[in-house]
Each structure stands twice: as structure tokens, then as C-alpha cells.
């Protein structure tokens, strides 16, 4: 992680810019047959951030493509 931060020092970075949060709400019946009014509500929120790297070096791109992330965290790189 420290190496990744050093690479970003030598490049021009704009961000992180918070994008709108996607919110999905699901209503599930508690019982399969009776009592339609008894429901559990579940929610999934997706938070997105935009980081714009203006002048990336080859080491910066290589470190971003080989970045290890925890489960449930995704990264998308567009060039």
C-alpha cells in the first residue's frame, strides 16, 4: 500500500469524487402462506467513487492492475 501511495505522489490525481449512491430495497414475506402484511425489508447500498489520474506512469498503471482488494470491493479501470 505504501508503494502504491508513493506512485500516486509522482502523478497528478483528481479525486476521490463521490458519485450518487445506488440503493436497492427488497421486501420479503416473513411467512410463505399467511400474513401478507408481515414483511422484512432488506437494503443494498452501492457507493461509488471516481479517481481521475491525469498523467499516469507505467508503474502506476501496473500497480493499479495488480491491486489486492478485500471481498466485496470492486475496481474498474478505464484508459
Image: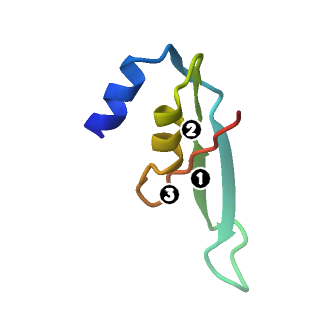
Frontmost residue, 68 versus 23: 68
8 is higher (above) or lower (below) than 42: above
Residue 73: give x, y in percent of width and height. 50, 51
The way the protein has been coloured in the rendering is rainbow
Q: Residue at x 70, y 84 (%)?
A: 32
Horizontally, residue 73 falls left or right of residue 77, namely left
Frontmost residue, 25 versus 39: 25
Q: Residue at x 70, y 36 (%)?
A: 78
Dot 3: element: loop
Q: Which mark is residue 74?
A: none
**Quadrant into which the C terminus falls:** top right
Q: Residue lying at the far bottom in this picture: please name it.
A: 33
Residue 24: give x, y in percent of width and height. 68, 49
Distance of label 2 from label 3 (alpha carbons): 12 Å
Q: Residues within 10 Å of mark 3 (few under 14, many from 20)?
A: few
For disc 1, the marked residue is 43
Please report contact status of discs 2 and 1: CB closer than 8 Å, yes or no.
no
Q: Residues within 10 Å of mark 1 (few under 14, many from 20)?
A: few
For disc 3, the marked residue is 72
Displayed quadrant of residue 38: bottom right
For disc 2, the marked residue is 47
Q: Residue lying at the far front in this picture: please name it.
A: 58
Amino acid at each position: 500500500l505504501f508503494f502504491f501511495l508513493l506512485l500516486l505522489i509522482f502523478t497528478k490525481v483528481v479525486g476521490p469524487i463521490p458519485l450518487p449512491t445506488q440503493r436497492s430495497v427488497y421486501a420479503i414475506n416473513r411467512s410463505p402462506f399467511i400474513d401478507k402484511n408481515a414483511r422484512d425489508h432488506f437494503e443494498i447500498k452501492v457507493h461509488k467513487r471516481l479517481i481521475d489520474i491525469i498523467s499516469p506512469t507505467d508503474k502506476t498503471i501496473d500497480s493499479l492492475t495488480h491491486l489486492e482488494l478485500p471481498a466485496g470491493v470492486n475496481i474498474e479501470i478505464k484508459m
